[in-house]
Image (cartoon, rainbow, N blue to C red):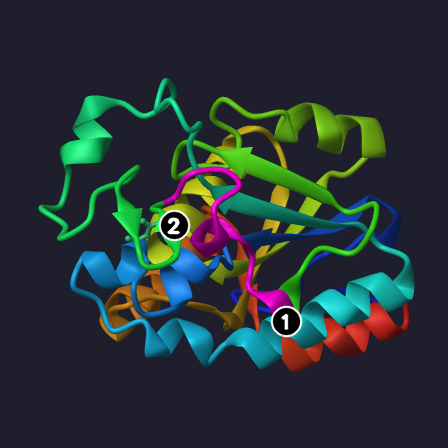
Amino acid sequence: MAGIKAEPFTFPARPRELALIVIDMQRDFAEPGGFGASLGNDVSRIARIVPDVKRLIESFRAAGLPVIHTMECHRPDLSDLPLSKRNRGNPSLRIGDEGPMGRILISGEPGTAILPELAPADGEVVIEKPGKGAFYATELGDVLKKKGITQLVFAGVTTEVCVQTTMREANDRGYECLLAEEATESYFPEFKAAAIAMIRAQGAIVGWTADVDDILEAIAHA
Ligand code: TIU
């Protein structure tokens, strides 16, 4: 692989050390009646990126590269949910409350599940995370170390919340990070644009960003 065309410059991909991380593509963020909607957001924006996330997942699978999925969710007894998080945002339904798709953001509930089109394949790692960042209070760091992964391609939602937080965590842990631009979305288009600009500013201070087509092109030759 000759690198991936990216901003602010070519991403120096090493296929044997590369994994895809799909952040929180859950019904609770993408469907009416879930957590995202309870915060007052237009969730249709999120549903629109599903085809681009799907072709990214399929290209990693076809190349035999790891695909790792995350889910933002909490234990049924709420023991991993700080009160500050439960009370935040003045939502119509709070985390743990019973909603139309089961209890909001609780492990095992229908609304907490990953969208069926993007469901993890047998053997793919799924990380349940109580925070916005996927490294906080999870096994993600150990999983990546065991697989010898040093470079991460990111997709998922939302760009400026869970995706950006996880990229910053990964960057500080020594991973090289690349965000797939059409495979991530925010409820606020201006926040997505700002997050992308921040990530790749100052010579990729947090990471690189690239078009899905350019990532697919490189992965096909991995
Ligand atoms: N509200 C919002 O933008 N995001 C979240 O609450 N979680 C994730 O980004 N996954």
Image coords of residue 111 (percent x, y): 44, 55
Q: Which amino acid, by three-letter code, is at mark 2?
A: Gly
Residue 146 at what x, y percent from top left?
82, 27
Q: Which residues are magenta?
A: 105-116
In the image, taking residue 210 as reference, residue 38 lies left or right, namely: left
Of the 4 image quadrants, the one containing the N terminus is bottom right
Q: Residues within 10 Å of mark 1 (few under 14, many from 20)?
A: few
Q: Is residue 128 above or below residue 26?
A: above
In magenta stretch: residue 96: no
Which residue is most to the left? Answer: 90
For the residue pair 105 and 89, the one nearer the viewer reads as 105
Q: Main secondary structure of the magenta part?
A: loop
Q: Secondary structure at mark 1?
A: helix
Identify the mark nearer the N-term, 1 or 2: 2
Query: Image quarter for residue 105?
Result: top left
Residue under numbered circle 2: 102
Verify whether residue 112 appears in magenta. yes
Q: Which residue is mark 1?
A: 117
Across and down, in percent, residue 33 comes to: 29, 64
Q: Is residue 126 left or right of residue 59?
A: left
